[in-house]
Image (cartoon, coloured by chain):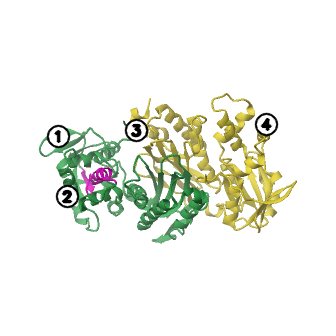
Chain colours: A green, B yellow
């Protein structure tokens, strides 16, 4: 059935039914908070918890820019649209609480497609105890476009910013880098074909359904372990530059230390035009965390880190100079290239 | 100069420069609040004022759906994109504080266009003491699309919802209805021509630059005058239906009482296919407030209303039945048509 058959009000009802009731008001340590007015009024209203700051971020996914519908399922798109936003909350060390959806939808889309998409959004939101409390829908002439705002909370004393890195700090990343870019390459080439291997499948999933590192970001924040933090959405090179600019520092990155997965090595071993390190440095959408820690607490960090969290790897150190890539086999090269840049042709 | 020449990071810098610094933290009645982290990190962070709820809303304007660039200037588009969102804050009786911008922009757009657009956003935000604290930009394959989230605050005891109207309440609207639709008609027909009269000019402006009724909404809320409220964005008929559905009531609307401007009467007098009342009932984007008040305080409302606010008009009463249109000259007709509906063909 086409959306045009149920109309705007039919779709709004579906959205409201999907996300009502919101997660009930919570009470942690005697400090109440929660949804006062959810979907269905001019605004949503929430009660902030005493002693917390409100944090908020917005990100978008647009058809034919960020994704193509011939390789991503609507359910996966729903998941991803929430997860990439939660990744920004993770990068502050915060707790996500609420989401607003603003969707521009071609009228030719089917009700079934939107149902599956909303199921994905709901699944992702439920998994991280996020209530969808409002939004907006309109038609679109051409492409499906998803704009999501997440609202969360954090204690001021635990918030981790991009600024704060100091010369001598060690640089860490969570997980493995470059998988998402490899997954996208596979998706683009094999749109209509079956999965060829478990390796391909894993890389594709890393692109389609990134994991927001909320547990890890929160752990670093609560224990005051990180001096600065960002999520890697545009590639390690671009996001490291942002940390360095905001903190007024440079960095030495030991390229051999950049964590690349077995799957990525397998992928590049069959494709001469791809180098694992290049994918890790200059391609985006890994949604891992990049953070800095004081050198004297590196051992403490490693001992505190527990196996319920994804692995972390030290990839370099903060300096007073430029950003350099240091190759074990071939000297030092200033970082010049950047990751994905909208508008650049 | 094309956006592709300054790239994503050039545009982000421009946005950051435009909206930094945010409005300083405020202190009203000893209760502090304000921006703790503005544009330039993974999230923005704000300190909510003690004793207030946080309210939030999101709305979008998409090229070729909500506007065409051959009749709206980028500066006007910037103003309008903020004002339509502030209108939702007004409809709760709230105070707007912060905005997040999520923009999808064709790379062919010029830097000058975006500059003018951002100036409009800044002008509108400054006028209502709103700080733009974050956002997101991406390229777009086809159309320019503007998604804005506004965050504000309200005292729980003063918040006005869509539900709350009771049989016997009187129904009011602010300002005049239907002007925006007439303005749009003029704009569509005379895209490249000069303004033909002061009347045309005024109607066009009512479409291009709606005034959010923040002062009026806040006044109604603070004085606990309204039992329910909504802003009229999809036409009186649609938005009245929303009030009635949420409140579980009906309404009698005296169509002769619906306020239509001299300019609208002049417009329709020259165009036989348009009736003022139809434009007021079924066309959108007036952004006036529709609200209900208890019958016993109607006199009090009128005496309290001051001339710094736009006029208000009583247009009907809340009932236990259906929604009826009562014409002075021709009996009672159940309301059936609705206003603008995305997706309906």
Q: Is residue B122 visible?
A: yes
Report which residue position mark 4 lands on: B270
Q: Earlier in the sequence, mark 3 or mark 2?
A: 2
Mark 2 falls on what kind of element? helix
Circle count:
4
In depth, the one of B297 and A157 nearer the eye is B297
Report which residue position mark 2 lands on: A262
Could you give the CA–CA distance between mark 4 and mark 2, rounded to whole angstroms?
74 Å
Q: Is residue B58 visible?
A: no
Q: Earlier in the sequence, mark 3 or mark 1?
A: 1
Q: Are marks 3 and 2 on the same chain?
A: yes
Q: Is residue A219 magenta?
A: no
Q: Which residues are magenta?
A: A169-191
Choose top left, top right, bottom left or bottom right for residue A79: bottom left
Give the side of residue A112 with respect to residue B161, left or right.
left
Image quadrant containing the N terminus of chain B:
top left
Report which residue position mark 3 lands on: A343
In depth, the one of A55 and A29 nearer the eye is A55
Give the chain of mark 1: A
Camera-nearest label, 4 or 1: 4
Mark 4 falls on what kind of element? loop
User: Residue B96's spot in the image, x, y percent?
Assistant: 58, 51
Kindly identify the residue that appears in the image at 67 percent across and 35 percent down: B189
Report which residue position mark 1 lands on: A332
Could you give the CA–CA distance between mark 1 and mark 2, rounded to whole angstroms?
26 Å
């Amino acid at each position: 059935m086409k959306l045009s058959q149920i109309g705007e009000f039919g779709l709004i009802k579906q959205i409201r039914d999907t996300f009502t009731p919101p997660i009930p008001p919570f009470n942690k340590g005697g400090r109440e908070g929660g949804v006062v007015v959810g979907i269905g009024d001019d605004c949503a209203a929430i009660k902030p918890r005493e002693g917390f700051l409100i944090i908020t971020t917005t990100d978008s996914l647009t058809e034919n820019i960020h994704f193509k519908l011939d390789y991503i399922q609507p359910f996966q798109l729903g998941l991803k649209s929430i997860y990439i936003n939660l990744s920004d909350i993770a990068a502050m060390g915060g707790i996500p609480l609420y989401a607003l959806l603003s969707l521009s939808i071609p009228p030719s889309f089917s009700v079934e497609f939107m149902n599956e998409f909303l199921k994905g959004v709901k699944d992702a939101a439920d998994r991280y105890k996020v209530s969808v409390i409002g939004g907006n829908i309109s038609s679109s002439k051409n492409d499906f476009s998803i704009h999501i705002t997440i609202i969360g909370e954090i204690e001021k004393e635990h918030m981790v910013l991009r600024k704060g890195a100091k010369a001598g700090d060690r640089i860490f990343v969570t997980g493995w880098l470059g998988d998402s870019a490899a997954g996208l390459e596979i998706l683009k080439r094999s749109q209509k074909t079956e999965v060829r291997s478990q390796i391909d499948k894993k890389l594709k999933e890393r692109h389609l359904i990134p994991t927001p590192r909320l547990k890890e970001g929160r752990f670093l924040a609560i224990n005051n372990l990180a001096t600065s933090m960002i999520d890697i959405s545009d590639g390690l090179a671009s996001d490291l530059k942002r940390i360095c600019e905001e903190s007024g520092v440079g960095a030495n990155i030991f390229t051999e230390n950049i964590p690349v997965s077995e799957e990525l090595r397998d992928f590049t071993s069959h494709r001469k035009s791809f180098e694992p390190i290049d994918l890790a440095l200059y391609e985006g959408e890994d949604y891992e965390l990049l953070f800095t820690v004081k050198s004297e607490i590196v051992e403490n960090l490693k001992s505190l880190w527990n196996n319920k969290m994804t692995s972390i790897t030290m990839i370099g150190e903060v300096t007073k100079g430029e950003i350099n890539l240091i190759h074990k086999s071939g000297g030092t090269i200033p970082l010049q290239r950047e990751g994905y840049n909208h508008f650049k042709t």
